[in-house]
Amino acid sequence: MKKLLVLIFVLISNICFSQLKAVIIDSKTKDKIPYVNIWVENESIGTTSSEKGEFELEIKSPKFILFSAIGFETKKIYSDSIKNILELKPLTTALDEVIIRYKKLTQELIIGKFKKSKINHYYGCGLKPWFTARFFNYSDNFEKTPYLKKIRLLTKSDVKNSKFNIRLYSVSKNREPEKYMYDKNIIGVAKKGKKTTEIDLSKLNIEFPKEGFFIAVEWLIIENNRYEYKYNMEGSIKKLKGLSYEPAIGTILAQTDENSWIFNQGKWRKAWQNNGLGKKYEDKYNLIAVELTLTN
């Protein structure tokens, strides 16, 4: 009888859980695609492909799965259709012409300055990938320093050298993030602790668009970023296990949601309003703490 119960349990487990495992490749070049963010539609489940384009994902029943990677069309496919290899189609949208500069860099302008010591609130990542974007308006003051040189963010990481991705977007007529300004991953590496993390953009020759643009931070659900910790629920002495994917990204407060956006499950929406975080944060919105250096 016990053997029969064990057999029934194993059969039920196999029915209830399905393990997806595949390699994601470029449909044109057949190259493997790293850091593809993957979501189970309408569920809080997700992961990210490794540097070799590989991923594993456990789901309870057949579902639609969404795949998002910079430079590729977002793909939505039923889980039963996913085999050993999954192909993503490259975007055919033409990027702005790259301008090669030979002039020595002599001028700089810094916008979006923040004070590291003043920031104690962060965006973090749990079990599924997502990203948040901040809009930067153009100003006539940028005319003499029109090129993006570097980005500085406030990061806080509980693991060594956690990785995140930067995406740059143009702005749509509806003031939402739209097209890629650069169609490759821009990987940032955050050292352990509360740090100011710098990312060099000087070799990309990207000019600040007159319409403004978005800087987005994308979390990666990869083993290197995984952090397990223990915590107590209020009123209980029992230790519970928690899991996050590093790093956390520092935020500053804003009075409106005009410049802050969230991307999740393949859709953009405005950032949520703070509630229950104390008088200082109540009814305000969070912007990622990003400092941008411009040059000529």
Image: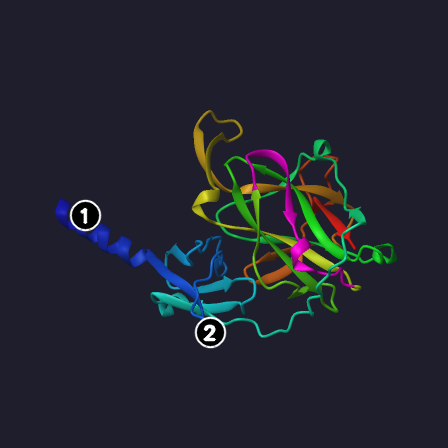
| Residue 147: numbered disc | none
Q: Amino acid at mark 1?
A: Val
Question: Which mark lies nearer to you, 2 or 1?
Answer: 2
| Residue 158 percent location from the top left of the image | 52, 35
Which image quarter holds the C terminus? bottom right
Query: Please, what is the three-letter code of the amino acid marked with disc 2?
Result: Lys
Left or right of 293 in this view: 166: left
Q: Which residue is mark 1?
A: 6
Q: Is residue 179 left or right of residue 162?
A: right
Secondary structure of the residue carrying tag 2 is: loop
- Can the viewer see residue 283? no
Residue 195 is inside the magenta segment: yes
Q: Residue at x 52, y 62 (%)?
A: 68
Residue 28, labelled with which disc?
2
Is 161 positioned to the left or the right of 281 in the image? Answer: left
Q: Distance between the Cα atoms at labels 2 and 1?
A: 47 Å
- Depth check: give the residue in front, 83 or 18: 83
Determine the residue positioned at 46% across, 61% down: 33
Residue 63 % position (x, y): 42, 64
Q: Which residues are magenta?
A: 190-209
